[in-house]
Image: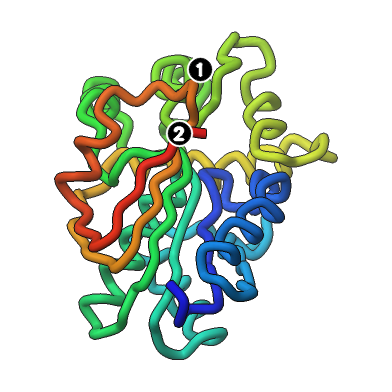
Amino acid sequence: IKAARQLFLVHGVGGNLATFYPLASAIHAAVAEAAHEPIKVYGLHTTSVDSPVMASLDDMVECYIEEIRAVQPSGPYLIGGWSFGVTVAAMIAQALTERGERVSGFLSIDAQAPRAHADFVAYLEQNGIGSPSDLYADTHFHTALQRFGRHFGFKDTTPDGIKDKLHTFLGYPAASCTKERDDRNMVAVTNLFNAALARPVPFAVENALLLRASEGWFDDYEESWAAQLTAANLRHEEV
């Protein structure tokens, strides 16, 4: 990764970078040590609550590739993400390599490899949920988070104030109004909906570091990555 001096990290399910702040200095120091030189860390995120929610992961990938190239026009690239953001980061890495660019490093923070979650897809189909707004409806939202919130680390799924709890989980202060809360939550719900339908993303990079929480819930973490990721230097670490 020595030739790449910028690390681009994709946000979590909420579309913002609030969850990265506690990790930023540690990530910066660890990557700089591995590269034996200073590294700049850039966060990729939804611009603001007033920005339109991206309708698909493909739209998000193209938008973020434009942002990456505005900072670094050509490779080698360092790409990474946390939780939901790992799916987008993998798609970015795949798209860049398909366009002839080098991806010298890939960082996954506590996520399985991209794939559709069959249990979630079945839930959507059984309940006639065809859009993120359907999923956010009161008739489905609590049950969906109770059953599938663990996919992005959401654990407090008791029904009282569930939408407020999600808003706080995403790193936001108390909302000034219900619309502000719901607009921010809908970014996460749209991302969750799209990620649940994600396709596998086979891709190859030069170096990959896959970090997994020691108290994670993944049953087939290493197997899921082995089926999709090829790396000359691959490290799994539990933190």
Q: Amino acid at mark 1?
A: His
Q: Which residue is mark 2?
A: 238
* Point 18% across, 51% down: residue: 228
Q: In the picture provided, is 34 more to the left or to the right than 219?
A: right
Q: Earlier in the sequence, mark 1 or mark 2?
A: 1
Residue type indicated by callout 2 = Glu
Dot 1 lies on which element?
Answer: helix
Contact flag, marks 1 and 2 (Cβ < 8 Å): no
Q: Nearer the viewer, mark 1 or mark 2?
A: 2
Question: Going by the picture, which residue comes out furthest to the left?
Answer: 227
Residue 127, given in percent of the width and then of the height, sits at 29, 21
Looking at the image, residue 191 sits to the left or right of residue 167; the answer is left
Q: Is residue 191 visible?
A: no
Label of residue 142 in the image: 1
Against 113, is 60 above or below?
Answer: below
Quadrant for residue 103, please give it.
bottom left
